[in-house]
Image (cartoon, helix red, strand yellow):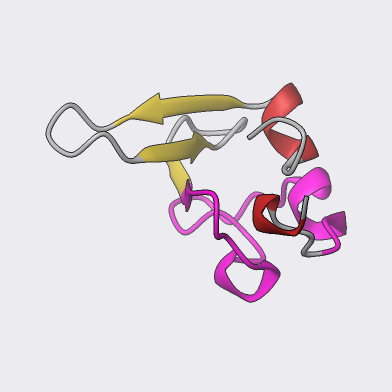
């Protein structure tokens, strides 16, 4: 996932113990920013953290290239 999603390299992922889904953690508040999966598209990413409103610039700048295009 790191190759397809450069914002994951600098961020932190948290895995759901129940289903195994991975979530990007907000650098500002520690809340769950968004779910990260191999078929993720740019329109699925929020512009800002739903909990505190913080904008992760790497996520905002991501061009939408997903891992399935490699």
Above or below, comparing residue 18 to residue 42 in the picture:
above
Name the quadrant containing residue 4: top right
- Left or right: 15, with 35 as reference point: left
- Left or right: 51, with 26 as reference point: left
Residue at left 75%, top 59%?
A: 69
Residue at left 73%, top 45%?
A: 56
Above or below, comparing residue 43 to residue 45 in the picture:
below
Residue at left 63%, top 67%?
A: 41
* Residue 63 pos. (x, y %): 86, 63
- Left or right: 6, with 14 as reference point: right
* Residue 15 pos. (x, y %): 33, 28
Give the residues drawn in magenta, as a range: 34-63
Residue at left 56%, top 70%?
A: 44
From the image, which quarter does the N terminus lie in?
A: top right
- Between residues 31 and 45, which one lies in front from this camera angle? 45
- Main SS of the magenta segment? loop
- 61 within the magenta span: yes
């Amino acid at each position: 996932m790191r190759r397809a999603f450069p914002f994951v390299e600098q961020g932190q992922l948290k895995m759901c113990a129940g289903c195994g889904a991975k979530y990007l953690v907000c650098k500002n508040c520690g809340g769950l920013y968004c779910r990260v999966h191999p078929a993720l598209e740019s329109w699925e990413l929020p512009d800002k953290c739903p909990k505190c409103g913080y904008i992760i610039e790497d996520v905002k700048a991501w061009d939408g290239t997903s891992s399935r295009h490699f």
